[in-house]
């Protein structure tokens, strides 16, 4: 296996493994068992594979993959593109410390936490705004009983181990 | 407070430190960037969570479908016992008579004893008076909320009255909507009292102003089937014009044996259970099978087939079909012919079953899952011999075979041991398989009966699929997969516009398909586990546009976050999955060892996944699930022994060989059912001899090579108090899988 050495030596079995991973994730949304998924699920699939594209990246991705006007994406197109993305680590995830800095930027008074109200204000007005549901869910998950989000604490709570 | 970490490549705003506080002025662009980062990160987390939820769902569904396969296993075992019962004559247990309790026509009245039953003063539960009034139903609701049980006397009376009422009803109920009130339609409840109460709370109790249709599967699986069915019958009696019950595939005494209703009744009604159960049997077969609203909306439990004909369906004597798993009785002469015919067919093995199965598999809806059905349990099996074999006519009529001949090897009886006499004394045809050739040769009365049987089974068992056409539902072993064209055709034929059905669990409680012409409605929330799915009900007004209402019962008052729900469901799913692994340990180990000739204890991830897939036949993303199932060695390969690490047996039985233990684990539920049948007086005890006979028979049927001595040793060691009888509750306890790392024992069957 290519452990920590030049990635150039990716073996056939690695590719096979990657293919399997991509297929598994894809098929979780393939309701009709015909190797297509709704284009709106693509984001979820890509995220779940450990990649961290921006909205712009996703739009480009989808434009490349979508079957004209059908609103669906076929596995045959998705598989090679996604495998490539994984092999080249194209959209690496954000390191925790950068994430913390982002919170600190928002935490104007450097309190170490953000109030729920602040969070709502920021998440729904700035950037790629949250929907009402997303906001509710986030608050429920992350805010403590005083309705504060201590960002340094919650970050380790909500990160995953990387596979492969 | 400063950042301990280095600043990124972004330029930060000015930092102005005063003595008291740090005030940062940040530029808006930076704020936006930070917000976007957090949003992306959070969305990614949620996507991963969604994926975990989906995988968890897949695990539950795969295991459930695999479990349904076992049901067919049991049916075929019954057949096998029937064929071989001559061996049991004399010393053996009178299994056949137990099983085939003389089929009393449900139409006939049974002797009523409820008037003689005395209710003690100490009984604080509801005392019903017939005809029922609102105070009775209120008393029942209160009592069940307080975990009380209705006294057997009142239950019996309730059942007698319900039976009388149902006899007057047609097979298909015709309803009309009105301008003033909506009709509420509910799907599967499966003994979930909390869901029923929640629906009543949100939507109102059944009444003249709040009419209801309940679409089958009221019992089994859930722990409160008795309470649910009592309430439904009580409201039915109270408002016969406003409460309507459709039969589901679980309103069937053989299904009840396996999926928990029978057990629940016997546990709650130890003294009178034996009188209560046959009454339920009668009532279930007397339930109407369909409801039509305004001549436009058809409501059935399962679905339809290309042969569904509502006019024919109306004409059937529905009570003749007591159980979908038993072909209706044939007369004696017909039986003779069939028996000898089947014997000769047995000699030909069904190779054509494979080729026909390939074409049907491509048509069948769940292509991936169809692979599961060719379960090789690693035990010796014989090729299926009934209905599937060589003849060409078999392929057309086997379309409704309750046990698909296309699942090779696992389901059929063995070739008969040469028995000197045909079972002339058998006067009941107990044949779960549709034998096409049998029907071809029989005179028309039996053909009609077969047609009738198929009509009802199709209604109760079918599932929709996305591809066109109609193919046998080999998954469930009954009914069909029906495509959008079939739906279209039926709707047109009868001037209908919508089909509402249940039968399948859906994450959101409902789902549309066939271009909106079919709605699946499921009303048992958290069906697999806390947080697994919502329940839903539909309201219909005069305009006939369905409105959906969703809900989810929560055991705790605190609202769970999605994370918590997913985690809970996930852990339950993995527990169930690990038990599957454990009960196939020997086969898995030999599979692993084939890839590990040098006995290093490790195999590659791919090989590991391959072994699991081929042994368990569950279509799951094994690589993704691996971290929950076993450990990796330092070099990234799988330490396969770790799959079984934290699992053990309930009680250690010294003389049980691993092979036997595993087989017992795997077939626990079937064994339990058989015990329940043998234990005629429901004492919880069977004699050592009965146990031995049963076990020998069952293992012969499975093709398991179990030494007679091993069985005898086992029987002896289980007979803990050496009194010649086995407490089979203890026995089952011993073969329950225990998770060693748990403090509490997990639920296993009958969720």
Image: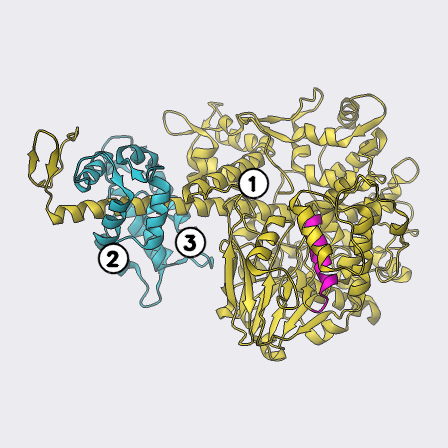
Please identify the quadrant where the C terminus of chain B is shown.
top right
Please name the residue that numbered disc 3 is placed on. Answer: A29
Question: From where the camera sits, is residue B394 visible?
Answer: no
Q: Which chain is yellow?
A: B
Front disc: 1 or 3: 3
Q: Are marks 1 and 3 on the same chain?
A: no
Q: For the residue labelled by badge 1, is the local secondary structure a helix, a strand or a loop?
A: helix
Q: Quadrant of residue B656?
A: top right
Please name the residue that numbered disc 1 is placed on. Answer: B616
Residue sitting at 19 percent across and 44 percent down? B34
Q: CA distance from mark 3 to mark 2?
A: 19 Å
Please name the residue that numbered disc 2 is placed on. Answer: A59
Percent x, y for residue A28? 43, 50
Percent x, y for residue B731? 73, 29
On the picture, is B613 further left or further right than B685?
Answer: left
Front disc: 2 or 1: 2
Tell which residue pokes out farthest to the top in this image.
Answer: B654
On the picture, is B65 further left or further right than B267?
Answer: left
Q: Which stretch is magenta?
A: B226-241
Tint of chain A: cyan
Q: Quadrant of residue A71?
A: bottom left
């Amino acid at each position: 296996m290519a452990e920590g050495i030049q990635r150039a030596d990716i073996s056939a079995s690695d590719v096979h493994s990657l293919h399997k991973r991509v297929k598994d994730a894809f098929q979780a949304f393939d309701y009709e068992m015909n190797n297509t998924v709704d284009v709106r699920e693509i984001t979820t699939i890509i995220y779940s594979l450990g990649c961290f594209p921006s909205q712009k990246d996703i739009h480009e991705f989808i434009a490349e993959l979508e079957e004209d006007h059908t609103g669906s994406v076929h596995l045959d197109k998705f598989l090679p593109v996604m495998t490539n993305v994984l092999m080249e680590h194209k959209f690496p995830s954000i390191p925790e410390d950068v994430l913390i800095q982002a919170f600190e930027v928002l935490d104007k008074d450097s309190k170490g936490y953000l109030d729920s109200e602040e969070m709502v204000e920021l998440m729904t007005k700035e950037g790629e705004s949250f929907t009402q549901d997303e906001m509710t869910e986030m608050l429920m998950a992350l805010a403590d009983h005083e309705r504060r989000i201590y960002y340094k604490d919650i970050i380790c709570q909500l990160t995953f181990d990387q596979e492969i | 407070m400063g950042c301990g970490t280095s600043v990124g490549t972004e330029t930060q705003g000015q930092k102005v430190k005063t003595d008291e506080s740090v005030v940062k002025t940040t530029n808006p662009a930076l704020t936006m960037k930070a917000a976007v980062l957090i949003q992306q990160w959070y969305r990614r987390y949620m996507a991963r969570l969604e994926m975990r939820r989906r995988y968890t769902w897949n695990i539950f569904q795969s295991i459930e479908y695999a479990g349904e396969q076992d049901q067919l296993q049991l049916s075929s075992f019954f057949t096998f016992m029937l064929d071989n019962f001559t061996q049991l004559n004399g010393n053996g247990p009178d299994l056949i008579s137990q099983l085939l309790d003389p089929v009393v026509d449900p139409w006939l009245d049974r002797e009523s004893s409820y008037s003689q039953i005395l209710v003690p003063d100490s009984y604080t539960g509801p005392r019903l008076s017939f005809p029922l009034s609102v105070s009775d139903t209120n008393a029942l609701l209160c009592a069940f909320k307080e975990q009380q049980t209705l006294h057997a006397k009142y239950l019996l009376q309730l059942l007698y009255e319900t039976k009388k009422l149902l006899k007057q009803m047609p097979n298909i109920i015709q309803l009309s909507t009105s301008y003033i009130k909506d009709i509420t339609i509910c799907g599967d409840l499966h003994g979930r009292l909390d869901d029923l109460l929640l629906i009543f709370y949100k939507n109102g109790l059944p009444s003249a102003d709040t009419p209801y249709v309940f679409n089958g599967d009221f019992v089994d699986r859930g722990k409160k089937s008795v309470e649910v069915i009592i309430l439904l019958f009580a409201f039915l009696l109270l408002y016969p014009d406003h409460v309507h019950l459709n039969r589901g595939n679980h309103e069937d005494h053989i299904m009840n044996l396996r999926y928990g209703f029978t057990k629940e009744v016997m546990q709650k009604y130890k003294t009178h259970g034996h009188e209560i159960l046959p009454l339920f049997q009668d009532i279930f077969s007397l339930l109407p099978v369909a409801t039509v609203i305004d001549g436009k909306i058809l409501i059935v439990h399962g679905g339809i087939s290309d042969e569904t004909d509502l006019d024919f369906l109306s004409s059937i004597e529905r009570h003749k079909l007591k159980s979908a798993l038993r072909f209706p009785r044939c007369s004696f002469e017909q039986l003779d012919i069939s028996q000898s015919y089947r014997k000769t067919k047995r000699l030909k093995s069904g190779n054509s079953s494979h080729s026909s199965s390939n074409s049907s598999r491509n048509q069948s809806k769940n292509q991936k899952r169809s692979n599961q059905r060719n379960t090789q349990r690693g035990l010796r099996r014989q090729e299926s011999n009934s209905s599937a074999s060589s003849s060409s006519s078999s392929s057309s009529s086997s379309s409704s075979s309750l046990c698909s001949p296309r699942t090779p090897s696992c389901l059929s009886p063995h070739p008969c041991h040469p028995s000197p006499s045909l079972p002339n004394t058998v006067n009941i045809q107990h044949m779960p398989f549709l034998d096409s050739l049998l029907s071809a040769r029989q005179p028309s009365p039996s053909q009609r009966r077969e047609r009738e049987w198929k009509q009802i089974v199709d209604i109760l068992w079918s599932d929709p699929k996305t591809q066109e056409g109609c193919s046998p539902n080999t998954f469930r072993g009954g009914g069909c997969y029906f495509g959008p064209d079939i739906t279209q055709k039926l709707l047109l034929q009868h001037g209908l516009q919508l089909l509402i059905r249940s039968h399948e669990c859906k994450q959101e409680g409902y789902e549309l398909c066939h271009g909106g012409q079919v709605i699946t409605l499921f009303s048992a929330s958290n069906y697999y586990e806390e947080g697994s799915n919502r329940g839903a009900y539909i309201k219909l007004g005069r305009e006939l546009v369905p409105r959906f209402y969703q809900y989810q019962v929560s055991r705790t008052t605190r609202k769970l976050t999605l994370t918590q729900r997913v985690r809970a469901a996930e852990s339950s799913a993995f527990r169930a999955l690990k038990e599957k692994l454990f009960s196939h340990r020997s086969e898995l180990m030999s599979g692993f060892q084939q890839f590990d000739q040098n006995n290093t204890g490790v195999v590659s991830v791919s090989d590991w996944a391959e072994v699991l897939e081929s042994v368990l036949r569950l279509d799951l993303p094994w690589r993704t699930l691996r971290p929950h199932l076993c450990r990796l060695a330092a070099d990234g390969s799988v330490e396969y022994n770790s799959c079984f690490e934290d699992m053990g047996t309930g009680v250690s039985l010294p003389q049980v060989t691993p092979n036997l233990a595993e087989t017992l684990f795997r077939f626990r539920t079937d064994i339990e059912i058989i015990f329940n049948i043998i234990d005629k007086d429901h004492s919880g005890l069977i004699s050592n001899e009965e146990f031995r006979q049963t076990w020998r028979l069952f293992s012969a049927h499975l093709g398991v090579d179990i030494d007679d001595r091993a069985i005898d040793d086992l029987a002896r060691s289980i007979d803990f108090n050496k009194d010649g009888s086995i407490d089979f509750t203890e026995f089952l306890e011993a073969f329950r899988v225990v998770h060693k790392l748990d403090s509490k024992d997990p639920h296993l069957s009958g969720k």
